[in-house]
Image: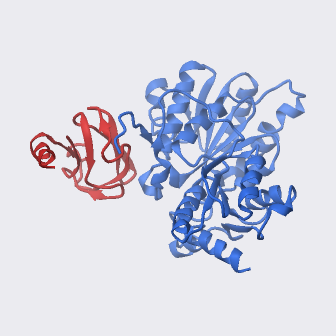
Amino acid sequence: MTATNERKLTIARAMAEAVAQEMRIDPSVFVMGEDIAALGGVYGNTRGIFDEFVSVRIRDTPISETAFIGAAVGAAQDGMRPVVELMFVDFFGVCFDAIYNLMAKNTYFSGGSFKVPMVLMTSTGGGYSDAGQHSQCLYGTFAHLPGMKVVCPSNAYDAKGLMTAAMRDDSPVVYMYHKSLQGMGWLATEPGATVHTPEESYMLEIGKAKVVREGSDVTIVSLGMGVHHALKAAAQMEADGVSAEVVDLVSLVPLDRDTIRASVAKTGRRIVVDEDYMSYGVSGEVIASVTEHDISVLKAAPKRVAYPDVPIPYARVMEQFCLPNPDKIIAAYQGMNAA
Amino acid sequence: MRLREIQDRFMATNIIIPTDLWEEDEEAVITTWLVSDGASVEEGALIAEIMTAKVQYEINAPASGIISIKEAADAVVPKGAVIGAIS
């Protein structure tokens, strides 16, 4: 295929481009985090920004998430628009008071006198043997707590538009990006995430899901890396005569329940794919969104392909056994019809 | 077809892994092609990323024209390797 204006970007480049473009037009935007300045972030998502803005508006921090995320909340309430990075979402433990008691709630506690317009970007996911403190997704943990928006891109186009929208939003936004989609070689990169991305700035609406593949027999709902598993499963199912629709949630908060319901109303069957732990999480919420709304559309009980409720193993074979994959999605569909 | 072969032989510019980006004889992995096979590219445009250990380098188009990818993403390549051509 000849594409004269093709401009494929990795998610890492798309995120960095969005932040740099916003910094050029909005002096209140600045970036803080560990190794995000001269190094450009361990996932490449702030590369090049340091060269342009030097050290004033992009700052490496000491390894104290409690301190710098707390500082970001204060700066946001004082009129700035900080973008801060929690390098691994797994590290949320030490700084969660700043996130869910301060960042998420101060707008409410102040009766709207203060806004907290900050972006907390954080990496999720495993698959490359980094064990139980560096491989979690924890989507449900953040999406469960009110007061913050939560987004999760599956490709570079969405990543750029979501980042621009997040920086312009007056609410705090938790921006969760999956390591395997970043385009960094050492993280088992998924090539499907590297897509054509316009250079000019644009926003993707937070709270809108996307039907990324149309189908009529079953709806596969997922987010982030799971979308790519779902698309691969759908392609294999097509060879067997099964027409699978794939819905990319894009945002967890607000959750686009209407798009999920409309898709399941069409197909009557639903599989939810989530790399976060199975219980009390995204997969259950997506299923409840349909069943409490209209159970009559269902032709079969919904299925989940999610991470088992165990700490993530280090051993490669054990981790791979636990992770969602296209084969598990296909098996879930077959189990659905056998029942 | 014959014209294309002649063009390839006489007009194509190879895309080569530079020999001066890092000191050791370590091999690199092509992490991402930022253009599709057969796409039209401008000289100097960013077209690929390669990586050694955890250091990433950029590959820019050595000429303008239609790109032909010879080594796919994830390929491990030594310094001086031809990973594609532009004609």
Q: Where is residue B17 in the image (x, y as percent from the top left)?
A: 23, 47
Q: Can residue A23 be seen in this view?
A: yes
Q: Can residue A273 be seen in this view?
A: no
Residue ID at (81%, 61%): A297
Q: In this view, does A221 lie to the left or right of B54?
A: right
Residue ID at (45%, 25%): A52
Decide: is A249 above or below A330: above
Which chain did the image draw in blue?
A
Front residue (pair A255, A330): A330
Which chain did the image draw in red?
B
Q: Quadrant of residue A326?
A: bottom right
Quarter of the figure with the N terminus of chain A: top left
Q: In which quarter of the image is residue A7?
A: top left
Decide: is A18 above or below A219: above
Q: Where is residue A29 in the image (x, y as percent from the top left)?
A: 61, 25
Quarter of the figure with the C terminus of chain A: bottom right
Please, which residue is most extreme toward the bottom here? A338
Q: In this view, does A72 lie to the left or right of A242?
A: right
Residue ID at (69%, 50%): A92
Q: Position of residue A27 (x, y in %)?
A: 60, 19
Front residue (pair A133, A83): A83
Front residue (pair A135, A74): A135
Q: Position of residue A233 (x, y in %)?
A: 56, 65
Total of numbered circles in the picture?
Answer: 0
